[in-house]
Amino acid sequence: MLSWMAWTWPTTLLFAGIFLSMGIITFIEIKKPGTSERHGILGLTTTRGDRLFLSILGSVYIFLAWLGLVGMPLWEPLGIAIVWAVFCFWKV
């Protein structure tokens, strides 16, 4: 049924993680609507969703740059991506 895409365990876990994080952000926004806007170091007013988007997009670029410049294994860029996500939610 899903033979058109190479669904491996890492691919499935990646998509599950993205959807889980979107679900958590949605649940938090329903519980406390509109309380997350803040003015960060980028000079923009961002919400939780904006910071989630920036952290996911930045993580993609981190992994692509690592694969292009270094190659495998991917444990180091995973650590960098986690630090980037923490930074996005803390300072951006």
Image: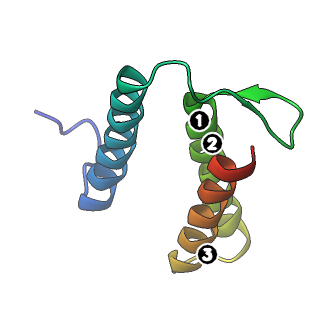
Give whichever of 33, 47 is nearer the camera: 33
- Residue identified by numbered label 1: 53
Which numbered disc covers residue 71? 3
Marks 1,3: beta carbons within 8 A: no
Q: Position of residue 81 (x, y in %)?
A: 60, 62
* Amino acid type of the residue tagged 2 in the rendering: Leu
Residue name at image x 64 percent, y 69 percent: 80
Front of the two marks 1 and 2: 1
Marks 1,2: beta carbons within 8 A: yes
Q: Secondary structure at mark 1?
A: helix
Q: Secondary structure at mark 3?
A: loop
Give whichever of 43, 5 is nearer the camera: 43
The answer to whether residue 75 is above or below residue 20 is below
- Residue identified by numbered label 2: 57
Front of the two marks 3 and 2: 2
Front of the two marks 1 and 3: 1
Give whichever of 48, 14 is nearer the camera: 48
The answer to whether residue 75 is above or below residue 24 is below
Give whichever of 54, 47 is nearer the camera: 47
